[in-house]
């Protein structure tokens, strides 16, 4: 080994000589011994401690001037950083290959900060030309790109890791991509696939170009074995034990821009691959803040990877002051194999700052569940909005395989704002954030949900999920939470849905407030009264250390209450300002089928069409009078065509929004949109004579029910 003195300067330098007389100074063949303080200029070679039990002080910013490996070092870091922003004493690879090997650890307190790029300037040279990419996507797999930064991590504990840093990568005419693989190690704050400046991953350049897909260069981040933590209290609740020295904020993986204010740009695609045995708290495909820009945000979750809390497609810090803008152009998120995710959102997880503005002006959001287990699936965002009245998005959610334990929504979800947790009690720490309990979660555009395979343990909704306002928060805002301003549709061609299907969204159950005055509160009891699937609106559905799904209180020591002072506004929550439809041609539905929503208005038509199923006479049993009871019942054994089912018809106990009926005295078979005609023929006026409940409560008086080609007037308005 070549020694390094305690002040971090070199005393000598030599290369290993090969048996044939050649010499080479490479990262593998030259080994430096560290004793005392970590050097600030790392030439090409491998760096490790002279004494594995000794502590090496890291108290200055470190730069690489060649390809470097660091392993077997016990560090004492004297300063750290926040979210990858400027600060602390980082290690910059300066566009060289950097491998952080085995045997790295640090004393408690501050941890390492490492970046694959530089602290300033522009990197224009490729480390590796024609780097082949591995992906489930058949078009992306094997495609090659020129790599400008190269970072691999095997061990160690880090505050922040960034593939680029604070410099510009590539140019408009000579694009470069970042490449980062996290095979091990623990990260307690932020991992950034991009940087704080501009990454020119594609020469076409601007966010408005039509060429916005996963085949562009940009960032490539693989997380295969690393652990990214929640805060100290969250980790203890999940069963992982203590993390750090009382951390009050959880970590997050950002596939796009971040660091130094989080306001960088990726002109190209931000690719994030979470696989193998990775364990994360939160992960997002785009950048951190509203004024970042990611042209295309792409995420794959596969293997046995676990994302305990949330995976999302756009930003995490709410867009409070940047105006309506394209923080992300297009989004695609796919799941495979045996992965586990607590909650998955196609749009953003907009917290910490109030989402006054949308983070996506146009483009598409595609969510594909091809395998794995997910608690809840949403096409829209948590609290944040996408699209505007003049610029719409298109959301597609497809369940092709795997298991969704609870519900599938095409729209977004309202919810409580993020807080900092006291490390020991889980109570709110300080006054940061904690702004409101609803958010906005609007979607301007079209939403479509496809169930083609797999299993959905709860219900399927074409729209979003709203929630009542909880009193006791610092401030409130937003109306019509989780609304879709556009059309919604649900198509079922296969798979199993254990609950019901709704063409629109899930609003707030206001029956529980009927005995209350229009001012005052109702004590919160953990689930929303009147719901069967549990509206745990101040809890999160998470995956614990044993791989089980649990409800986690958002913070302890606080008992929220429902605010009934806005009870008249609840009728507008999870509204669809447009038409909704349900089309069923296969699969199994254990509950009911509704063209509209659950406690949410629509302003257009509600359509239900069912075709291709088995046929039989409708049940003559007395209809159930229980609100919300199943609308199907078994009438025979399973066949190759699936179970034989018939519909028991009842409007008792339900204030329905849309009903209709048609008669045909010459047809002895009683048919409906829920009970298809023979040979898969669509239901028509001549093939149905029983009442059809196609929409649940509180619908608009401007629409009508359209069922398999015929139309009936709206009735039963509240």
Image: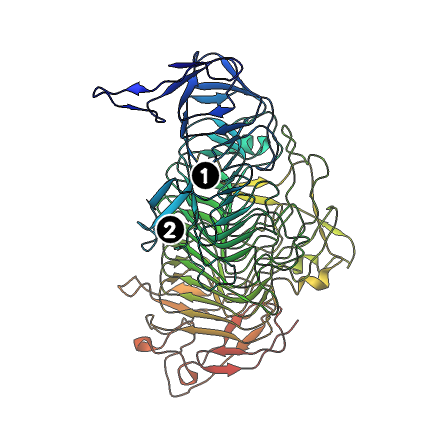
Of pointers 2 and 1, the one earlier in the residue sequence: 2
Observer-nearest of 395 and 50: 50
Horizontal side, residue 573 vs residue 407: left or right: right
Rendered image quadrant of residue 586: bottom left
In this view, 516 is above or below 64 = below
Observer-nearest of 565 and 295: 295
Residue at numbered disc 1:
548
Residue lying farthest to the left in this orientation: 20
Q: Give how far across and how far down residue 285 sits, in percent.
A: 49, 49
Mark 2–mark 1 distance (CA, rounded to whole Å): 16 Å
Rendered image quadrant of residue 100: top left
Residue 197, label in figure: none
Residue lying farthest to the bottom in this orientation: 666
Observer-nearest of 678 and 92: 92
Q: Give how far across and how far down residue 407 sits, in percent.
A: 49, 54
Q: Give how far across and how far down residue 401 sits, in percent.
A: 36, 54
Q: Is residue 583 something one can see in this rendering? A: yes
Look at the image and tell me in which quarter the N terminus lies.
top left
Horizontal side, residue 437 vs residue 252: left or right: right
In this view, 650 is above or below 69 = below
Indicate the secondary structure of the residue bearing disc 2.
Answer: loop
Indicate the secondary structure of the residue bearing disc 1.
Answer: loop
The residue that appears at 26% across and 63% down in the rendered structure is: 640
The residue that appears at 54% across and 15% down in the rendered structure is: 7
Circle 1 packing at 10 Å, graded few (<14), some (14-19), many (20+), is few
Residue 402, label in figure: 2
Observer-nearest of 671 and 396: 396
Colour scheme: rainbow
Q: Looking at the image, is mark 2 or mark 1 nearer the viewer?
A: 2
Q: Is residue 220 something one can see in this rendering? A: no
Circle 2 packing at 10 Å, graded few (<14), some (14-19), many (20+), is many
């Amino acid at each position: 080994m070549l020694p390094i003195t305690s002040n971090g300067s070199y005393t000598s330098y030599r290369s290993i000589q090969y048996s044939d007389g050649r010499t080479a100074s490479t990262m593998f063949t030259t080994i430096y011994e560290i004793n005392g303080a970590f050097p600030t200029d790392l030439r090409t070679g491998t760096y490790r401690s002279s004494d594995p039990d000794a502590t090496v002080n890291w108290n200055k910013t470190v730069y690489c001037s060649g390809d470097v490996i660091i392993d077997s070092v016990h560090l004492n870091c004297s300063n750290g950083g926040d979210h990858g922003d400027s600060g602390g004493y980082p290690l910059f690879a300066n566009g060289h290959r950097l491998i952080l090997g085995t045997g790295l650890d640090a004393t408690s307190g501050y941890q390492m900060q490492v970046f694959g790029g530089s602290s300033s300037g522009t990197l224009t040279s490729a480390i590796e030309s024609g780097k082949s990419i591995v992906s489930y996507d058949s078009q992306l797999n094997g495609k090659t790109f020129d790599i400008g930064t190269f970072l691999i991590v095997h061990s160690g504990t880090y505050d922040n890791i960034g593939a680029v840093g604070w410099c510009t990568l590539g140019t408009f005419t000579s694009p470069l991509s970042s490449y980062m693989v996290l095979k091990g190690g623990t990260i307690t704050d932020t991992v950034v696939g991009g940087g704080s400046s501009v990454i020119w991953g594609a020469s076409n350049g601007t966010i408005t170009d039509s060429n916005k897909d996963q085949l562009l260069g940009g960032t490539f981040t693989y997380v295969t074995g690393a652990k990214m933590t929640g805060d100290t209290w969250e980790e203890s609740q999940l069963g992982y034990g203590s993390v750090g020295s009382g951390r009050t904020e959880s970590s997050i993986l950002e596939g796009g821009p971040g660091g130094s204010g989080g306001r960088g740009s990726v002109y190209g695609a931000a690719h994030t691959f979470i696989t193998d045995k990775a364990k994360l708290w939160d992960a997002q495909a785009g950048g951190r803040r509203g004024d970042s820009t990611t042209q295309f945000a792409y995420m794959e979750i596969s293997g046995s990877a676990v994302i305990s809390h949330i995976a999302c497609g756009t930003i995490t810090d709410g867009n409070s002051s940047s105006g309506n803008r394209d923080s992300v152009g297009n989004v695609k998120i796919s799941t495979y194999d045996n992965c586990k995710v607590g909650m998955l959102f196609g749009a953003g997880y907009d917290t910490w700052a109030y989402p006054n503005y949308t983070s996506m002006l146009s483009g598409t959001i595609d969510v594909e569940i091809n395998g794995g287990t997910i608690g809840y699936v949403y096409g829209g965002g948590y609290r944040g909005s996408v699209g505007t009245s003049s610029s719409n998005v298109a959301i597609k959610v497809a369940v092709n395989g795997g298991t969704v334990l609870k519900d599938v929504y095409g729209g977004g979800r309202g919810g409580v704002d993020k807080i900092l947790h006291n490390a020991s009690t889980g109570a709110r720490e300080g006054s940061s954030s904690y702004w409101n309990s609803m958010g906005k979660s609007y979607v301007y555009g079209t939403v479509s949900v496809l169930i083609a395979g797999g299993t959905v343990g709860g219900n399927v909704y074409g729209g979003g999920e709203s929630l009542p306002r909880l009193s006791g928060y610092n401030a409130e805002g937003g109306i019509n939470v989780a609304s879709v301003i556009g059309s919604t549709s649900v198509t079922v061609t296969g798979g199993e849905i254990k609950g019901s299907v709704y063409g629109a969204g899930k609003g707030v159950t206001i029956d529980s407030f009927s005995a209350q005055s229009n001012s005052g509160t109702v004590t919160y009891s953990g689930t929303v009264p009147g719901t069967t699937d549990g509206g745990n609106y101040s809890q999160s559905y998470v995956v614990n250390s044993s791989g089980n799904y649990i409800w986690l209180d958002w913070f302890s020591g606080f008992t929220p209450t429902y605010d009934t002072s806005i009870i008249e506004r609840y009728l507008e929550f999870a509204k669809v300002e447009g038409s909704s439809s349900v089309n069923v041609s296969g699969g199994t539905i254990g509950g009911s089928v509704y063209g509209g929503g659950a406690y949410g208005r629509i302003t257009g038509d509600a359509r239900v069409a069912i075709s291709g199923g088995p046929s039989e006479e409708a049940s003559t049993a007395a209809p159930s009078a229980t609100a919300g009871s199943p609308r199907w019942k078994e009438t025979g054994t399973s066949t190759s065509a699936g179970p034989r089912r018939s519909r028991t018809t009842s409007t008792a106990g339900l204030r329905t929004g849309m009903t209709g009926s048609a008669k045909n005295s010459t047809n002895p078979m009683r048919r409906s949109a829920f009970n298809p005609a023979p040979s898969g023929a669509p239901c028509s006026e001549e093939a149905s004579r029983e009442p059809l409940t196609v929409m649940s409560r509180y619908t608009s008086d401007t629409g009508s029910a359209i069922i398999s080609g015929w139309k009936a007037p709206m009735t039963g308005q509240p």
